[in-house]
Amino acid sequence: MKSLWSAFVKLLVLAMIGGALLATVAVLVANRQLPSLDALTAFRSTSDYVPLREFPRDLTDAVVAIEDERFYLHDGIDYVGVIRAGVANLSDELSQGASTITMQVARNFFLSREKTYTRKLYEVLLSYRIEHAMSKDEILELYMNKIYLGQGAYGFGDAARTYFGKPVERLTLAECAMLAGLPKAPSANNPVVNPRRARQRQAYILHRMLELGKISRGEYDGALLEPMRLK
């Protein structure tokens, strides 16, 4: 019995070593095939690109609160967020996903949406590369200019004009929270197509902002009472 157990342990150790070696080779090969980040620099030079300083603070706070609340703490992959999101999603369909803002930037600029292990590996490696090449504010700025928000709008500057007919810097807290709810499901959370669901998502985001200390109770109550005025 002892000899069988010893043989099993040896096989298990060899399998683990072999798996680690294969994973290392896969990472090295994938890392050599990663695209250049020049596309990010070029995108920041486009005519309608909005600098982060021109977005309302309420909007950036809302986006980070719902999309990646540990954005300024992790290095591109939020392992704490992955575990928390996995538990929360069992009971709350409105909770945030496990993809970080950096991972979404990598996916939106360079990758398809196919769900394969290879694509996920490229997404992780690109996220680390982006984090080492750019500041957090630069990454957030890229995200807020690139993300699709429904109704043909890409980026929050475009979305502010599309949904509310105003420049992004004039958005109210309530409008910021509503737009921040769009990235996860631009069709399902769209206030034009589904105003009731958009309101639910807006309320959830406002509550997260309150919990995180980004807004006061008075601001929270006022935003909930604000009527929705679409373009």
Image (spheres, helix red, strand yellow):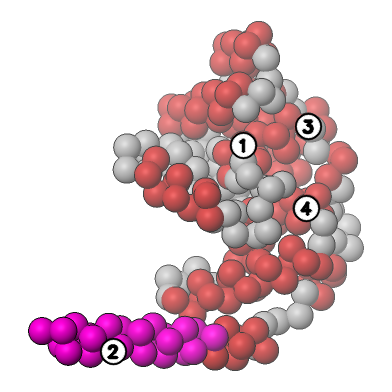
Give the alpha-carbon distance from disc 2 to disc 3, as whole Å. 56 Å
Amino acid type, callout 1: Ala
Q: Which residue is mark 4?
A: 136
Amino acid type, callout 4: Lys
**x then y, percent, for residue 6:** 23, 86
- Pick whichever of labels 2 and 4 is earlier in the sequence: 2
Q: Which residue is mark 2?
A: 11
Kindly indicate whether the residue at mark 3 contacts the one at mark 2 (C-beta within 8 angstroms). no
Give the label, 2 or 3, closer to the camera. 2
* Magenta residue check for 201: no
Give the alpha-carbon distance from disc 2 to disc 4, as whole Å. 44 Å
* Left or right: 225 as drawn, with respect to 145: left
Residue at x-position 62% and y-position 27%:
212
* Left or right: 201 as drawn, with respect to 168: left
**Nearest to the observer: residue 38 or residue 2:** 2
Q: Secondary structure at mark 3?
A: helix
Q: Which residue is mark 1?
A: 65
**Image quadrant occupied by the C terminus:** top right
Kindly indicate whether the residue at mark 3 contacts the one at mark 1 (C-beta within 8 angstroms). no
Mark 2 neighbour class, 10 Å CA radius: few under 14, some 14 to 19, many 20 or more: few
- Pick whichever of labels 3 and 4 is earlier in the sequence: 3
Kindly indicate whether the residue at mark 2 contacts the one at mark 1 (C-beta within 8 angstroms). no
Count the labels in the image.
4
Give the alpha-carbon distance from disc 1 to disc 4, as whole Å. 15 Å
- Look at the image and tell me whether residue 145 can be seen: no
Residue at x-position 61% and y-position 15%:
220
Q: Which residue is mark 3?
A: 57
Q: Which residues are magenta?
A: 1-24
